[in-house]
Image: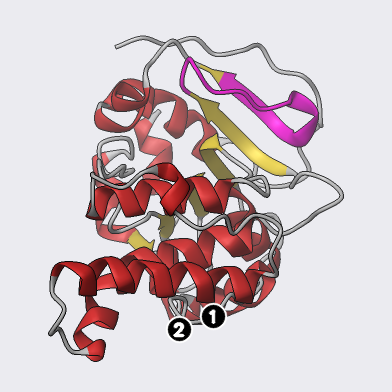
C-alpha cells in the first residue's frame, strides 16, 4: 500500500492549530515518506485575525494563494473546527477533485465562542467566576471580538496594572486569534459543509450524508492523532481515485492500536 503513496508529486496540505494545548498533529498519522512533502497551514496565523473576523471564504482564498507556489496539493487534511475552512480551501484550488480528509470534524454553534472565551479566561485567571466573563453570544462577530478582547486585556492589566497596552495586546494575541477564528467558523449557515473522507475517534459523530465517506474507529483522540494506528487507512484513502468516485455508503472502519 505504501508504494502507492510515493507515486504522486503534489504536497500534502495539513491544517493544524499551532497553539492548541494539547496539540494535535497529523505527523504521527501520515506515512513517513510524505513528511518531506507536507505543507502546514495554521489558521490562527491569518493576518489580523486577533483584530477582526473575516469570513471563512476570505480565509480560504488567502491560504489557497499562500500555498500556490508549492504546486497542486495531493490532498488536504484538517481536523475539528477547521473542517469547513478546509472544505472551502479545496474549492479554491485550481485542480478540481483534490481529496479532503477530516479527522473529528466540528462545526461550532452560536454558543461556542462564549465557551471558548470562558476557557481562555479561566486559563488566565482560575479565580474567575463564570458570571464575570461577558456573554458574547448573539452579538455581531466584530462586536463580540471587540468585547472579548477588551476583557482578556483587562485580565492581564489586572495582574500587572502598570503594563503597557501594547504589551497587553501581545500577551493576548493568541487568545484573541482563537476567538476571531471561532467566531468566523460559528457564523450562521443553512447547511453543514459537505466533507470528503471523515475519520472519527470513538466519541465523535458526523452524518454519513454530509461526507463522501465516514470511517469510525475505536480509538480515543490521543490514539487517533498520536499513533500510526490509522496510517493504513490514510494510505488507502490517498491511493483511491480523487474524483468521480461513486457516492455510496462504505463499511465503517474499526481499527484499534
Residue drawn at the location 68% of the way across and 28% of the way down: 213
Q: Nearer the viewer, residue 4 or 171?
A: 171
**Residue 182, numbered label:** none
Q: Position of residue 68 (x, y in %)?
A: 50, 79
Q: Which residues are magenta?
A: 201-215
Q: Is residue 172 visible?
A: yes
Residue 14: quarter of image: bottom left
Q: Secondary structure at mark 1?
A: loop
Residue drawn at the location 43% of the way across and 72% of the way down: 149
Residue 186: quarter of image: bottom right
Q: Is residue 10 visible?
A: no
Q: Secondary structure at mark 2?
A: loop
Residue drawn at the location 81% of the way across and 31% of the way down: 247
Neighbour class for label 1 at 10 Å: few (<14), some, many (≥20)?
A: many
User: How many tags in the picture?
Assistant: 2
| Residue matched to label 1 | 52
Neighbour class for label 2 at 10 Å: few (<14), some, many (≥20)?
A: some
| Residue matched to label 2 | 48
Say whether residue 213 is magenta: yes
Q: Position of residue 105 (x, y in %)?
A: 56, 38
Q: Please, is residue 16 above or below residue 111 in the view? A: below
Q: CA distance from mark 2 to mark 1?
A: 6 Å
Say whether residue 155 is magenta: no
Residue drawn at the location 32% of the way across and 73% of the way down: 153
Discs 2, 1 touching: Cβ within 8 Å: yes
In the rendered image, the quadrant that contains the C terminus is top left
Q: Please, is residue 209 above or below residue 22 in the view? A: above
Answer left or right for 17 relative to 131.
Answer: left
Residue extending farthest to the right is 190
Answer left or right for 141 relative to 115.
Answer: right
Q: Position of residue 226 (x, y in %)?
A: 25, 30
Amino acid at each position: 500500500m505504501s508504494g502507492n503513496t510515493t507515486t504522486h508529486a503534489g504536497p500534502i496540505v495539513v491544517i493544524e492549530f499551532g497553539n492548541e494545548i494539547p496539540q494535535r498533529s497529523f505527523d504521527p498519522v501520515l506515512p513517513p515518506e510524505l513528511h518531506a512533502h507536507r505543507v502546514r497551514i495554521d489558521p490562527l496565523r491569518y493576518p489580523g485575525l486577533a483584530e477582526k473576523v473575516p469570513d471563512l471564504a476570505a480565509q480560504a482564498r488567502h491560504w489557497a494563494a499562500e500555498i500556490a507556489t508549492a504546486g497542486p496539493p495531493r490532498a488536504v487534511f484538517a481536523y475539528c473546527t477547521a473542517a469547513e475552512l478546509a472544505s472551502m480551501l479545496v474549492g479554491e484550488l485550481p485542480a478540481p477533485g483534490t481529496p479532503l480528509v477530516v479527522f473529528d470534524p466540528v462545526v461550532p454553534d452560536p454558543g461556542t465562542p462564549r465557551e471558548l472565551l470562558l476557557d481562555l479566561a479561566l486559563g488566565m485567571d482560575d479565580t474567575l467566576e463564570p458570571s464575570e466573563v461577558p456573554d458574547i453570544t448573539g452579538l455581531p462577530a466584530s462586536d463580540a471580538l471587540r468585547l472579548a478582547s477588551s476583557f482578556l486585556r483587562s485580565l492581564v492589566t489586572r495582574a500587572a496594572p502598570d503594563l503597557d497596552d501594547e504589551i497587553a495586546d501581545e500577551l493576548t494575541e493568541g487568545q484573541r486569534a482563537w476567538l476571531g477564528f471561532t467566531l468566523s467558523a460559528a457564523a450562521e449557515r443553512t447547511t453543514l459543509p459537505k466533507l470528503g473522507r471523515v475519520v472519527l475517534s470513538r466519541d465523535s459523530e458526523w452524518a454519513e450524508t454530509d461526507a463522501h465517506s465516514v470511517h469510525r474507529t475505536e480509538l480515543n483522540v490521543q490514539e487517533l492523532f498520536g499513533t500510526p494506528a490509522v496510517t493504513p487507512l490514510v494510505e488507502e484513502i490517498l491511493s483511491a481515485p480523487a474524483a468521480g468516485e461513486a457516492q455510496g455508503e462504505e463499511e465503517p472502519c474499526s481499527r484499534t492500536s
